[in-house]
Each structure stands twice: as C-alpha cells, then as structure tokens.
Image (cartoon, helix red, strand yellow):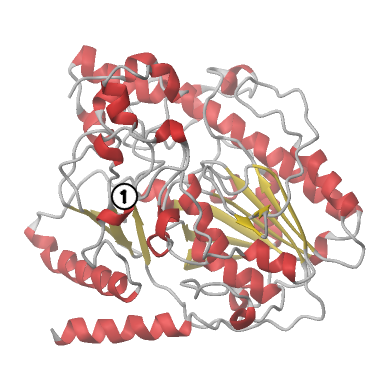
Amino acid sequence: MNKYAALLLMFLGLLTACQSPPQTSKSSPPNILIAIADDVSFPHMGAYGCSWIQTPHFDRVAREGLLFQNAYTPNAKCAPSRSIILTGRNSWQLEEAANHVPYFPDKFKTVFEVLAENQYFTGHVAKGWAPGKVGEINGKKRQLVGPAFNTKILQAPTTGIAQFDYAANFEDFLSQKPADKPFCFWYGSLEPHRAYEYGTGVRLGGKKTTDIDDLFGFFPDLDTVRNDVLDYAFELEYFDQHLGKMLAMLEAQGELDNTVVIVTADNGMPFPRVKGQAYERSNHLPLAIMWGKGIKDPGRVIEEFVSFADFSPTLLDLAQIDIQEAGMQAFEGFSLGEILENKRSLPRREHMIIGKERHDVGRPQDQGYPIRGIVNQDYTLLVNFKPDRWPSGNPETGYLNCDGGASKTAILHQRRFEQETTYWDLAFGKRPDVELYNRKNDPDCLYNLARDTNYREIREELFIQLMVELNAQGDPRVLGQGDIFDNYTYAHEANRNFYERFQAGELGPEVTGWVNPDDYEQD
C-alpha cells in the first residue's frame, strides 16, 4: 500500500507539472508543417535503417533535425490518434473521441483552432481529423485542422492512391497566406492506407520480394504477404515524394529555415495484428522534426519516450501562446521545446501509457475491445478488459477491425484450408486478460510471459504503475465506468447496430468496403 501511495503521488506530481510546459523564447513564431502518413509502423523509414523503403525526404528531416526512436501514439487508430494530436490529451480522457468514427466533443478545443485565433493562417489537405463528425460554433462547422485545400487533383499512379495533388494544394495554401502571418498546415496523406493495387510494389516500384529482410514475425513468410508489404512500401514512398515537393517549395521561398517540419504517422501499418491493436508495431511510430532556425545541434537521435499528446503543448510553445489562456482542456503531454533546444538533461517520460476502446464495427451491440497498457524500455504489459470478445471483431462479420487485403486473406486461408493456426491465433484469436512481452528479446511481441513465474514481480510492478497513472488521469475504464465507451454512438449511420443488421440480412459484405468477401467466417 505504501508503494502504491508513493507511485500515486509521483504521477500526480507529473500531472500537475504537465499543465504548464516551458515557453521557448523566439523572436517571432515559426511556420509549422505537420506531415502525417496514414498507417505506418516504426521502423519503416530509411533513416531507421529500413533498406527496402526509400524515404529520402523523411531522412533529410531526420538528418537536418532530430530523429525520434521512441515516439508512440496512445491509441493506434485514425480518429482517436488524431484527436490526441489535436488536444494534447490521452484518448480515454476525450469522452466520445476515444472511439473511432465518433462525434468530436464540443468541449475539446483543438490546437489548430487556438493557432487560428492567434494570427496563424491554418489549413489542411486531404485527411484531417477523421473519420467522424464535428459540431458547429456560432452556426459554422468547426474546422479542427483549419480549412481544406483540396481542389488540385492529379492522375494517381495506381487505383489505390488518392487523386489529391498534395503538393499543389500546399502551394495553393501558401499563395493565399497573408504576408504578415505565420502558417500551420496539416499534410494529411491518404497513403499508405488501404486498399492497394496488388503487385504495384514490384511492377511500379522496382522492388523484389526478397528485398524485405525484416518481415515481422507475426506474418507468414509467403510471396503473397511479401507482395502486400511491398505495395505498402510503394505508397509510403509516394507520401515521401510529396513531402519532398513541399520542402522544395519552402526552400525556394526562403521559408524552410523558419518552418518547423514534423513528419510522422497516425498509427501502425494496415495489416493483421498491427493497426487497431496495441502491440509494439501498432503504437510505435516514425517521427522526425526539422527546424533550421530553432533546433540546436541537429542530427541528434532522441531516445526519450514521446507521446502524440506532446504535439499540442509543443505547438503552443513554439507559437508563443500562453497555454493557460489558450482555452484548451489541461494537457497530458509535455512540450518538446527543451528537446529541440537541447536543454533537457533528464527525460520527462521513461514509459508510455497506451490503450484503446471501440474501433471498427463488427461486434454485438457495437461493443469495443478495451485495452490499457504500459511500455517501458524493456517490456510491454497489456491488460485486456474483455477477453471474452474477439479482439479484431467477430469472425462472422469479417474481423472488421483489421483492414482487408492480401495478408489478411492469406492468414485466414491458412487456417481454413491448411489447418495452420499460428498466424490466425496471433492476429484474430481471443487473448488472455494480461499479456507481458520482453521487447529486448521479442520486439514483435510473440511470446506472452504474463504467466511465467520468473516475470511475476515485473508484471505486478508494471500493473500497479499502469493502474496508478490511469487513476490519476481519471480514466473511466479503471474507475469502473468503462461501459460508457460502448454506449457512445457511432457518428455514421452505416456503422450503428452493424452486427445486428448484418445478422438479420439487412446488410451485405459489400457495405464493409475493402474487406474481401471470403474474410467472413463462422465462430
């Protein structure tokens, strides 16, 4: 009990400290460019040593700025992860916005809205905060990431790539920016989100399936899977190409040195056991930040844990906006200003808290799969609060919290036609209530040590630390009020009561979009 109390006091102290991150001192606020790829796992960028993906522009940002080794989203799904970026709070502190496809609560102001109120010219291209719905202020729809600049389109190289000309739309945005205002722009790529045009990594990207020398251990080593992963790589490189065009524009205009460039992704790759889950490859994401005028000692590699909740306090810090007067809810994150200026001697954070609630459709009564977890340098502990539920959605509705594609179907076919269940168990099978992984020896989180008596003390210490911190953050799930997340309604009518309508024959497989027809199974 004394140990518990000491931990509680420590985390309450941290909670108080994060309310007022230090303000950096700059002569004028910088421009800000946030580039967010849609579904990319660490370490899938060239700067991390990934040889089969070419990302020269991300690599430039890392080389001329900072490369982060331990950046995590607390929730590995599009809408909740983006909500965390925009509010500086963990998803379980965001009411409906903890879920995927939610109504964004009116009470939570976004950092883009604050920047727009403080002389910043804001905007975005393609995917901003999504998917979900937002309300109105004074009769006008809220712009959580500023106005859209989406008019410029192009002929995409594949059917799986969006037709937005991201760079041309950024140029349009810059042409409309008032000369006396700094800007904050959100480059919301739709790549490498599924669906893919199968075989483009080889056909158009000039890649070979043998190029992949670090296939994740929870994927079967099949030619089908390797092609699928190379298609993902091709689309990630497309994201990087448009980033390069944007950097070139800023350089030509003499604005690059005074622009903070943040490059990351919203969650892990859209593959089984990754996106929408809570394993290492789900939440651990690439991150590089460049700022010619503001980063001291560029080229550093940052080992400190960074949360997506850190972005909002960082942006307000850089913009020299008083956080207490910004009108936002209290932050859970910290400003990264001291890291940029190389002033921090001790890390603010030596672990990450992660978790999830309801993501995609496919369970009775629109239920989610609640998880909370803690990640430190060596271990990941996960608590599955409803282990009786299917983690990726019910079999009969197609495991809909896993995007459809060649790898998903290959794993399902292995079980159905070859009686090979290893990869199905990892991706789709039911899970125990507690999972513990030693990531030093098992970075893909394949071997659960939670019942190993040799790890009992580590498991108990991490569990206590996790519960103490979540209590301090007011998480309804650990306070006995977790059902509230299942009771929040989906924002899109097509998602509501999906399971019941599907079972009644009112909906067919086609409504689920990219899921392959034979992904539907019986329990």
Q: How many marks?
A: 1
Q: Quadrant of residue 179?
A: bottom right
- Please provide percent x and percent y for residue 89: 47, 66
* Residue 405 visible in image: no
Query: Most extreme residue toward the front, as rendered?
Result: 139
Q: Residue at x 43, y 37 (%)?
A: 214
Residue 334 lies, in percent from the top left, at 52, 74
Name the quarter where the C terminus is drawn. Answer: top left
- Residue nearest the viewer, comparing 189 with 368: 368
Disc 1: which residue: 487
Instruction: Establish if 178 lies above or below 487.
Output: below
Above-or-below relation of 72 to 317: above
- Residue 382's quadrant in the figure? bottom left
Left or right: 151 in relation to 321 = right
Q: Does any portion of residue 422 appear in the rendered image? A: yes
Q: Please identify the residue farthest to the left as the structure is shown.
A: 453
Q: Residue at x 37, y 16 (%)?
A: 508
Label 1 residue SS: helix
**Crowdedness near tag 1: few (<14), some (14–19) or many (≥20) residues, C-alpha within 10 Å:** some
